[in-house]
Image (cartoon, helix red, strand yellow):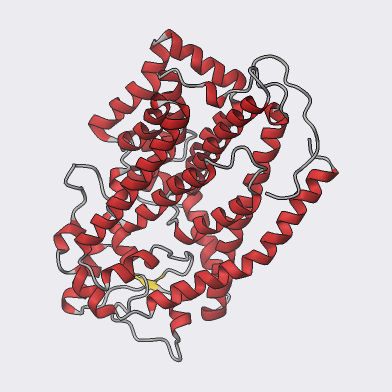
Amino acid sequence: MIDGAYLRHALKRAMACALLAPALAGTFALLATLVLSLPDEPIAANILDRPDVLLSRRADNGRVIDADTECIGLSVGMSGGAPVRAGETAFARAMAPRSAYGCEPFLAFLETGDPYEIREYFRYWHGHLVVTRPALSVLAYNDLRGLTFTACVLLLGAATWRIGRDFGAAAGLAFVLPFFVLNALGYWVVATKATTFALAVGACLAFSRRGDRPAPLVAYFALGSLTAFFDFLTAPALIFCLPTIVWVMYRRRGAAAAGGADGKADRNADWRVDWRDVIALGAFWTAGYAGLWAAKIAIAAMVIGPAAWADAMGQAAFRIRGESDLVDAYWPGLALYRNVAALKSLWAPVAIGLFVAAPLIRADARAGLVSIWRRGRLPLALAAAPLAFLELLSNHAQIHAAFTHLNFAPICFLAGLALFGRTAPLLLPEGKPAKPANAVPASE
């Protein structure tokens, strides 16, 4: 299914992305510079309005909060009591920012001015600062949590409503239920996690109306770039895979409608076309993600020297198989086990009962699982990819298991569709599909 016409189509999109990349990098750099140019004093005062809120490791509903990562994120770009680098500009401060490590030293600095141990934190764009610093310039930190919570609830509600309207209420329930079981609520109240959640669910909304169009290659390049900007290595694979599953559902629904009752006449019903397009989407997303992340390190190296590359490579190796007092072993599957175990005494049994036991016990749900295996392998592969990400970054996934387990959401979504008897949107039509046409539309 990869012929000359499709290659020319993809090449045109790649050229457009090559032109877009410098504009995105420049925009990200400008945004980071602008928000780090805001004065620290009102931000510090608003963080200290309720320090107990920031120090709390659990929300009022009992779900775990990644407080230390939030403190690290909030401290990015602040002085920390360290001397300013000679000739440092606002741009240099934004491209090679410093941070604290944990809440206690950060809050001690805000309260007493005691300097903390500085960490160079240039490996990320820290896009969350675009949300936190302007908001904290005028709002107390507790109010910022209210804003992120409300925004995430509205986005999730809109995505659930749209999927429920188009595929049935049970499909909407299957989409939303994993987020409550897998501690999405712990994401909603901390900006360093809420930005990841909002990007993933917002992309589901954005691509749910593109299933009847050619693969949105440039849009996925932009999504990868936004992932590099906003995500704090929490769930980048989720940001790609979950919206793509939704896109495939709408693609197959559109194919069935265009092809008649059995859906076999339309080119989109051919499994090779779906795989080809999703692989292309993955390539463009990866180019946006890896390219913009590499661009950030390259800019930081211009500020603090080539040692930035060595540090970045060392940190990448640490997150894969680095030595840590918090990680005992790297057996295959151990990262997945740690993430399930991190759900603790209540939610782990709920997750296993809802998304493993119940689909296996009910005969019709088992039939749904079999149909996914036979005719829905593309969505299944997309749902499994975030789990492979956890295994690849085993050190990181084990240390942060209480938060990275949101990567189970896509596979739980598929299990929920089987449980509620709504697997049809995932599946290819039965029987031998029609041979697809090779023509590629001129535009996306």
- Which quarter of the picture shows residue 51? bottom left
x and y, in percent, of residue 311 in the image: 51, 67
Please indicate, yes or no, whether residue 100 appears anywhere in the rendered image: no
Residue visible at 41% across and 19% down in the picture: 419
Left-right relation of 68 to 412: left
Residue 381's spot in the image, x, y percent? 57, 32
Q: Which residue lies at the image location 50% right of the left edge and 12% below the top edge?
A: 367
- Quadrant of the image for the N terminus? top right
Q: Is residue 276 visible?
A: yes
Image point (25%, 69%), residue name: 106
- The quadrant in which residue 183 appears is top left
Measuring from the top left, give residue 181's x and y in whole percent.
31, 34
Image location (x, y in percent) of residue 118:
35, 73
Extreme residue in the bottom direction: 87
Q: Residue furthest top?
A: 363
| Most foreground residue, 316 or 156 | 156
Vertical arrangement, residue 1 with respect to residue 433, above or below: below
